[in-house]
Image (cartoon, grey):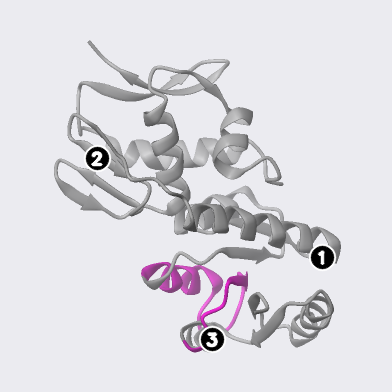
């Protein structure tokens, strides 16, 4: 079956350009022109990936992203009108997988879609039966579940993958580029600030959980999950 893409953008000409281009590449494409329609189409259509504009009527892209993440971990690529760090940070916090900035090149968009779909497929088929456990923390990559002090905590997939990777390689330091490679994949087209944003959000969740381990910055190098004596 063809990979299904849902495009949610209030600019109908952009929707049509994307639809025409990716149908020629063999994808099945549906379009929606406002946020409410986008959420409704997502539930009916069950796409493999969503291209989601930020500025839309009725519901903006941030709200649509929130609502999709409440029911699904399908990949979301946000479409923004400006290359704004705040927009990217907010999108990552809400669970977006990547960004493109208008005006975008269709070949670049295609590359980003393929990269995100590859990472999603790897995530979905990961055969990991082990749960990493330290004091007051349990991380299951198979179930995509984080427990702190015995209670499940909501966490976006990429944050959990980063935490799992660092915890499974405890006391080892990794550079931002190494983490991008290991967690996001060698073909990730973003920059190292992505790692910093995810570490910041993880620290907010992990604050005060235990005094026996820490998510530590090694200045000038990168990050590690350190076990304390």
Mark 3 surroundings within 10 Å by alpha-carbon count, few (fewer than 14), some (14 through 19), many (20 or more): few
Q: Which residue is mark 3?
A: 45
Q: Is residue 186 above or below residue 85?
A: above
Q: Which residue is mark 1?
A: 103
Q: Is residue 62 left or right of residue 26?
A: left
Which picture quadrant has residue 156? bottom left
Mark 2 surroundings within 10 Å by alpha-carbon count, few (fewer than 14), some (14 through 19), many (20 or more): some
The x, y position of residue 216, in whole percent, is: 40, 22
Q: Secondary structure at mark 3?
A: helix
Q: Which residue is mark 2?
A: 138
The x, y position of residue 202, in whole percent, is: 38, 40
Q: Is residue 169 left or right of residue 213?
A: right
The x, y position of residue 164, in whole percent, is: 39, 38
Residue at the image point whose x is 23% and y is 37% from the top: 137
Q: Is residue 30 left or right of residue 153?
A: right
Q: The N terminus is located in which quarter? A: bottom right
Question: Which of the marked residues, 1 or 3, is nearer the chain's N terminus?
Answer: 3
Question: Which of the marked residues, 1 or 2, is nearer the chain's N terminus?
Answer: 1
In the depicted view, which residue is nearer to us: 184 or 9? 184
Q: The C terminus is located in which quarter? A: top left
Question: Which of the marked residues, 3 or 2, is nearer the chain's N terminus?
Answer: 3
The range drawn in magenta is: 44-70
């Amino acid at each position: 079956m063809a990979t299904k893409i849902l495009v949610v953008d209030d600019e109908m000409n952009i929707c049509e350009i994307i639809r025409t281009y990716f149908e020629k590449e063999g994808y099945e494409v549906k379009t929606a022109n406002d946020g409410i329609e986008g959420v409704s189409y997502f539930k009916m259509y069950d796409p493999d990936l969503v291209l989601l504009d930020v500025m839309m009527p009725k519901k903006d892209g941030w709200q649509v992203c929130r609502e999709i993440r409440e029911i699904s971990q399908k990949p979301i690529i946000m479409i923004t009108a400006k290359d704004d760090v705040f927009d990217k940070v907010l999108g990552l916090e809400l669970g977006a997988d990547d960004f493109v900035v208008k005006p975008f090149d269709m070949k670049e968009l295609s590359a980003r879609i393929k990269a995100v779909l590859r990472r999603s497929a790897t995530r979905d088929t990961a055969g990991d039966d082990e749960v990493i456990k330290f004091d007051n923390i349990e991380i299951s990559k198979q179930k995509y579940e984080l427990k702190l002090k015995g209670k499940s905590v909501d966490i976006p997939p990429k944050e959990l993958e980063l935490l799992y990777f660092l915890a499974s390689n405890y006391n080892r330091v990794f550079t931002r580029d190494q983490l991008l490679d290991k967690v996001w994949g060698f073909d990730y087209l973003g920059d190292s600030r992505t790692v910093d944003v995810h570490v910041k959000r993880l620290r907010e969740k992990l604050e005060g959980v235990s005094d026996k381990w820490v998510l530590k910055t090694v200045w000038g190098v990168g990050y590690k999950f350190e076990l304390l004596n």
